[in-house]
Amino acid sequence: MPKAKRVQVVSLTKVKSRGREGRAHTMESVKDAIDTYRYIWVFSVHNMRNQYLKKVRGEFKTSRFFFGSNRVMAKALGNTSEEEVAENVHKVSEALKGEVGLLFTNQPVAEIRSWFNSFTKDDYARAGCVATERVVVPAGEIVRGFTKETFPNNMEPQLRQLGMPTLLRQGKITIDYDHVICNEGDVLSPQQSHLLKHFWIKMATFKIALLACYHKDTAEYVSYEEPSDAKETKGESSD
């Protein structure tokens, strides 16, 4: 008869301790960044994609990004004028609402704004995003892209499972009537987002929006209005 496995007891105090240590490390890193850099930017990320965020970090290797707990970052900066670690920096803490991050840098304001305003990357929309256009697949053999490339016939079952009324005729994937993948304004389902990807239709744009800037030398804080038409899907990252 096999021996019963011994029950392992996990100390919750150790788990909590690691959490406290992580928060303490973040706070210390933020405070060090305040001493090192002249500018603090508050930003948000639309349609988060890790591969594009890595490119942004690569362009700003001498700067520092923080994208995590707003409460921890705000505490490091100081939540009030009495607690702030630099003059007027508590206004940065007040801007840490929702899913936002911080960029610490010494690069000039005009240079930062110009670079981020011009950096966008188109990508495939994920489930939960809003469709930006109506997409209709016409009856007949289904094709995709500007080159009208046909689908390999082994994809027919997958397309059918995603809701398309496909039929395999003489090795070609066809539909007998027009099929609407989505209408403009639809909140995309997982099936719709997968179909759009199969048809090479990109409806999402990765972009970092700059919301505010703090200049340590002058203690000036400037807020920037975020574009009203931005449709966002945000994620987490940290440095």
Image: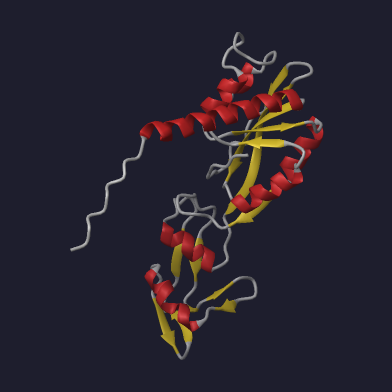
**In this picture, is 193 found above or below 239?**
below
Q: Residue at x 73, y 23 (%)?
A: 35
Which sits in the foreground, 153 or 74? 74
Q: Is residue 216 left or right of residue 11?
A: right
Q: For the point 53% across and 78% down, which residue is it?
A: 151
The answer to whether 212 appears left or right of 156 in the picture is: right
Report if residue 167 is visible in the image: yes
- Give the image location of residue 77, x and y in percent: 62, 20
Q: Is residue 96 among the parts visible in the rendering?
A: no
Give the vertical position of 160 relative to 66 (above or below). Answer: below
Front residue of this view, candidates 131 and 106: 106
Residue 190, by quadrant, is bottom left
Task: Point out residue 49 in the picture as x, y percentages from the top left corner.
Answer: 59, 50
Residue at 49% in and 70% down: 137
Please name the residue shown 27% across and 49% down the image.
6
In which quadrant of the rendered image does the C terminus lie? top right
Percent from the top left, x then y, of residue 52?
65, 51
